[in-house]
Amino acid sequence: MEKTIDEGIQGSVLSTERKVQNQRNLYIESYGCQMNFSDSEIVASILAEEGFNTTQNLEDADLVLVNTCSIREKAELTVRKRLEKFNAIKKDRPHLKVGVLGCMAERLKHQFLEEEKIVDMVVGPDAYKDLPNLIQEIDEGRNAVNVILSKDETYGDVAPVRLNSNGVTAFVSITRGCDNMCTFCVVPFTRGRERSRDPQSIINEVNDLWNKGFREVTLLGQNVDSYLWYGGGLKKDFGKASEMEQAMAVNFSQLLEKVALAQPKMRIRFSTSNPQDMTLDVIHTMAKYENICNYIHLPVQSGSNRILKAMNRLHTREEYFALIDNIRNIIPDCAISQDMIAGFPTENEEDHQDTLTLMEYVKYDYGFMFAYSERPGTLAERKLEDTVPPEIKKRRLTEIIDLQRQHSLERIKANLGKTQEVLIEGVSKKSDAHWMGRTSQNTVAVFPKEDYKVGDFVMVEMQECTSATLLGKAVGYSHNN
């Protein structure tokens, strides 16, 4: 399982269009990966039917929900501070109720509810449809908890509202849970076993988004390449399915093709991929359809075979190189990004050098890099001693980041002089006179506004760049408009 954390959106307060008939206000903050933010949209949709509008003003709230993340210690500490603040506010506003959602819920339910008494409700990621019942419980003065992990819940029948959306790009969840027991990861314990969503419900959601004006979707899952629909149920039980179910099953490559064909002018992205599960079929499908973006987030975590084995990553350095070679051969202009952990238990200097040489081989476009931090409940926490001193972790992480910066600059400079399609997402953060959008390779591009508008596909000639942004001039509309 891989998770990328966008630090710029941590703690975002989400809002939707108000319904006049709704009389109560929901204030919801989200932390962690994009899956958590997508789940917050599902929660807001469910509670909109229960009389709640969302608000960005804490003082207006009747119910505060914090959608939590356990992937890193920093996220947990941040959430705890926020819960303490909300609990303090309750002293002056006794009607206010506070709940915890998501990945911290199961592990810390007793601590939050019974020991520290800082929340009224704890809800795991598979129990959001039970929120109406749980809210009734807390309205009647009782604490409420549901952290049961489901074998079949995918929320495929819930049409999520789009919170704080730019109206152009959206996320569509296709799987929940994860079966890959990476020793550093809490997700199999917090989100349960892997199950896939009905492909027709995915296509219906994509079609609905297109009709509402959205022009790009990202198919989202803990490990999208493991997608496998055979009528419902856990992926691990596929072998027990009937011959007919197995024959009619839809894998990720087939789903990707179905979505690309459903809306030929809509951009399709996906995240996140696991090297051990990504097949050549997926790469060939990407190459076949112009509207599938040439970008793959392909976390590796370490360049050392010894450390990969300790992480329970079911691929080797050599197998990863072979996958990279296939991607480069089939889709020459494909951008690739990484997740990397520095200082995993027992990592030595030779292991660290293996990581640096792997990076030199791949030359990633960008990456998400972290020093290892022990997460409670993981296999690594139970079985591996955190042996690498903090100062060595910090030094190795700095070397990884410095090398990635070199490669990012090298990769972005290769775009100069090219004319590439950009989907306009909004106004540039640095200039109201410029649009900001992304190329197929997920690179941010900025160019003068002229007469274009948000949601347009524009051909942009790339003239300059920073280490992370292309600067150019629009030369006309793309044929996708």
Image: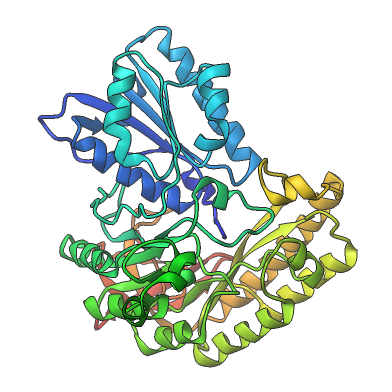
When asked about the image quadrant of residue 94, the answer is top left
Q: Outermost residue, right direction?
A: 349
Q: Outermost residue, bottom direction?
A: 329
State which quarter of the image contains the N terminus. bottom right
Q: Position of residue 291 (x, y in %)?
A: 33, 79
At horizontal 52% and vertical 89% (from top left) the residue drawn is: 332
Whether residue 299 is situated above or below residue 121 in the rendered picture: below
Name the residue nearer the viewer: 1 or 56: 1
Report how many numbered discs are placed on residues in the image: 0
State which quarter of the image contains the C terminus. bottom left
At horizontal 40% and vertical 23% (from top left) the residue drawn is: 98
Q: Outermost residue, top direction?
A: 92
Horizontally, is 133 left or right of 101 in the view? Answer: left
Q: Position of residue 153 (x, y in %)?
A: 35, 52
Horizontally, is 113 left or right of 360 in the view? Answer: left
Whether residue 84 is situated above or below residue 218 in the rendered picture: above
> Coloring scheme of the render?
rainbow
When asked about the image quadrant of residue 426, the answer is bottom left
Is residue 271 in sight in this rendering? Answer: no
At horizontal 68% and vertical 61% (from top left) the residue drawn is: 340
Is residue 171 in sight in this rendering? Answer: yes
Name the residue nearer the viewer: 468 or 136: 136
At horizontal 49% and vertical 41% (from top left) the residue drawn is: 31
Horizontally, is 445 left or right of 76 in the view? Answer: left
Q: Position of residue 194 (x, y in %)?
A: 47, 60
When asked about the image quadrant of residue 420, the answer is bottom left
Name the residue nearer the viewer: 213 or 102: 102
